[in-house]
Image: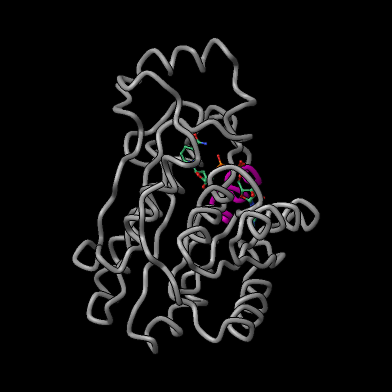
Amino acid sequence: MIKVDLTGKNAVVTGATRGIGFGVAKALAMSGAKVACIGTNEEKLKESVAEICAGGGEAKAFVCNVADSAAVSEVASAILAEYGRVDIVVNNAGITRDMLMRRITDEMWDDVINVNLRGTFLVTRAFVESMRKGKWGRIINISSISGLIGNAGQANYSASKAGVIGFTRTVSKELGNRNITVNAICPGFVDTDMTRVLNPVLIQGIKDRIPVGRIGSPEDIANAVLFFASPDSSYVTGQVLTVDGGLIM
Ligand code: NAI
């Protein structure tokens, strides 16, 4: 893990129950931050938080659907009441509803845009005032290489992730003068529950196109998050970092 000192910082990670979000929450907590872990599955979220605490980190579970505006406002009030201030927000919660574009239903479109894009907006907006007041902040949005180059069968997902990039670049321009950086990470192919459901032949095909010779891990993405979260990366904002092992598309 990259060494970053986040002692005294309070962080929020969405989708922290498992996969990349859990890896990110763990890495932030192990770096000294207090971490508010947001997820939808209360039981699993509590298990993940317990694991972080057992490892010596400080974390708390907050159940919330990031696509629900009222729920996000409510959870933001609860987190701010608990920690007083939020310094780091990692918008990681995301879903896929893969299908060829001509067969995507209205519901499949809306579900993906609402969690991945609207959720990123709602959570960022909910904590931005706290960061502005503190005159320090780090907003890190998890996009995807699908948002950069597209991927057949993922029109809804790619559109949501491209939207996250546009959102990131714009918000970085609005908040730069407050010492708040806003950056996005585009993971390539990472071994999580989201990708484990894919056909093994397809997974092998992707692996064959990764020059570093392996599928990514949540820790690989967490290391990039730590860089952006660090007090030392204050001159880096509005950037989109691809973390994909050099995947040849
Ligand atoms: P995952 O499916 O393992 O975990 C997603 C997390 O988001 C879960 O904790 C889930 O409970 C949470 N979540 C889903 N809907 C939510 C909602 N409405 N409100 C709050 N939490 C919600 O997925 P994974 O692979 O860990 O992905 C994390 C992020 O990384 C996603 O944004 C995904 O799009 C992105 N990503 C993943 C890649 C991969 O290869 N696994 C590649 C590129 C991007």
Q: Nearer the viewer, residue 223 or 153?
A: 223
Query: Residue drawn 47% across and 70% down?
Result: 124
Taking the image as drawn, is residue 249 in sight?
no
Query: Residue drawn 39% across and 12% down?
Result: 208
Q: Position of residue 168 (x, y in %)?
A: 34, 60
Residue 213's quadrant in the figure?
top left
Residue 205 relative to residue 15: left or right: left
Taking the image as drawn, is residue 164 in sight?
yes
Q: Residue furthest bottom?
A: 133
Name the magenta segment's main secondary structure. Answer: helix
Q: How is the image coloured?
A: one colour
Position above or below: 156 against 21 = above
Q: Position of residue 203 (x, y in %)?
A: 51, 17
Position above or below: 160 against 39 = above
Query: Residue drawn 68% across and 56% down?
Result: 54
Position above or below: 129 against 146 = below
- Which quadrant of the figure contains the C terminus? top left
Q: Position of residue 86 (x, y in %)?
A: 49, 77
The span shown in magenta is 106-115
Residue 166's quadrant in the figure?
bottom left
Query: Residue drawn 68% across and 52% down?
Result: 51
Q: Is residue 171 magenta?
A: no
Q: Is residue 110 magenta?
A: yes
Residue 197 relative to residue 234: left or right: right
Q: Nearer the viewer, residue 130 or 69?
A: 130
Q: Nearer the viewer, residue 151 or 62?
A: 62
Q: Position of residue 152 (x, y in %)?
A: 45, 26
